Image (tube, rainbow, N blue to C red):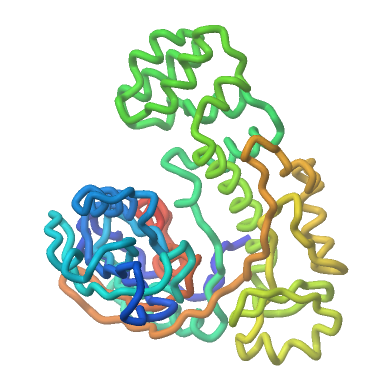
Amino acid sequence: MSDFLTASLPGTAGIIGDNATDFFVEEIPLYEPCGQGEHLYLTVEKQGMTTYDLLNKVARALGTRERDLGYAGLKDARAITRQTISIPGASPKDGLSLEIPGVRILSAQPHTNKLRPGHLAGNRFRIRILSPDEQACSYAEAILGVLQNHGVPNRFGKQRYGVLGNSHRVGHAILRKDYTAAIDELIGDPDIIMHPGWKAAATDYRHGHLEAAIKSLPRHCRNERRLLEVLLKGGAPQKALHAMPRKLLRLYLSAYQSSLFDRVILMRLDSLGRLWPGDLAYKHVNGACFLVDDPEAEQPRADSFEISPSGPLFGSKISLAEDQAGLLEHALLEKEQLRLEDFRLGSGLSMVGARRPLRVPLTEPDVMKVEGGIQVSFQLPKGSFATAVLHEIMKSDQTDERLAGGLR
């Protein structure tokens, strides 16, 4: 089974370069600052740092608490990105006077409320594909045309599953309460780890040499080191795992949710815009869902991209589809030997679930030749990934590997 919506069209091949200038991401705001209020909306262009790095540097420069700053979306470090953050109690003069390496201040305007995650309409992307096929321009134009007409498969993709590609397996093991398996996945398979120190640590761990594994772990593996130290002191696997930050454990559980959603995408790839009996249709204007009783009557709304079929991010409180669409979702749960109640883990780890559209609209597509390759531009709504588009355009595994941090 092909995992391309545009399987009948050839891909451009090529690579995404290592330079930040090879891809550009710009937030599309949900609203403009009103010009008054206690929060300063600071729009910046940054390079070589994550959103969290940016918040830390701004907070330190202004002498405020990092947790009081707001942001609408997370942006990759390996890109030139434009985004807006909010700062309480700061004046436009304070914002415009900031001097932070790698950051250019574009505007500073007051507003009445703090920015929250999701307070954006979408993102605009401009990405360079190097060393593509000679016919890359025409290939990319044709593929973008199909995606504009039919929508982009709203998949998370391999970049969601971490540098070892196994974050979802960690989450699945946590959900099954198989804490030893979760730790095995966290430390990793030495056969696929490239970093020499980490590789040595994973090998030592596999042979039961915990003290040697702790010494071999590279400095950035702080959480893994803490986990192994608990095991070395005789702590149970569950205790060791729960020594890790809750936020990180939730990311693993979320990765598992994402992997199941991607499997639903694959099973419905040939009918992403076709409503099935029992579908929970997603309204693109506000994210609300409703049960489809009469698919034929509602299909014109799907054809005009007012609504789309949705898929599950499984959780304890999610509503599942019914009839034909529901059979698929229930069968997937059964295959995984899971019940919705299993996502009620407690200890700050419970996952309530949500519905997500199986496809999203792509707008403002453009392709042009540039030195060394081609440049593709397009716009996507919030929460969707540029890698889903590049996956279709390039038809290359390198797409997901290069953009492991995710562009959305």
1 or 217, nearer to the observer: 217
304 or 42, nearer to the observer: 42
**Residue drawn at x 81%, y 47% as measured from the top left:** 334
Q: Residue 279 sits in which quadrant?
A: bottom right
Q: Which quadrant is the N terminus positioned in? A: bottom right
Left/right placement of residue 381 relative to residue 234 reads left
Left/right placement of residue 61 relative to residue 407 reads left
Q: Which quadrant is the C terminus positioned in? A: bottom left
State the image coordinates of residue 318 (x, y, percent, origin top left).
75, 58
Q: Residue 162 sits in which quadrant?
A: top left
Relative height, residue 315 to residue 288 (above, below) = above
Q: Residue 359 sits in which quadrant?
A: bottom right
**Residue drawn at x 73%, y 87% as measured from the top left:** 299
State the image coordinates of residue 84 (x, y, percent, origin top left).
32, 68
State the image coordinates of residue 94 (x, y, percent, origin top left).
18, 64
330 or 224, nearer to the observer: 224
State the image coordinates of residue 274 (x, y, percent, origin top left).
71, 79
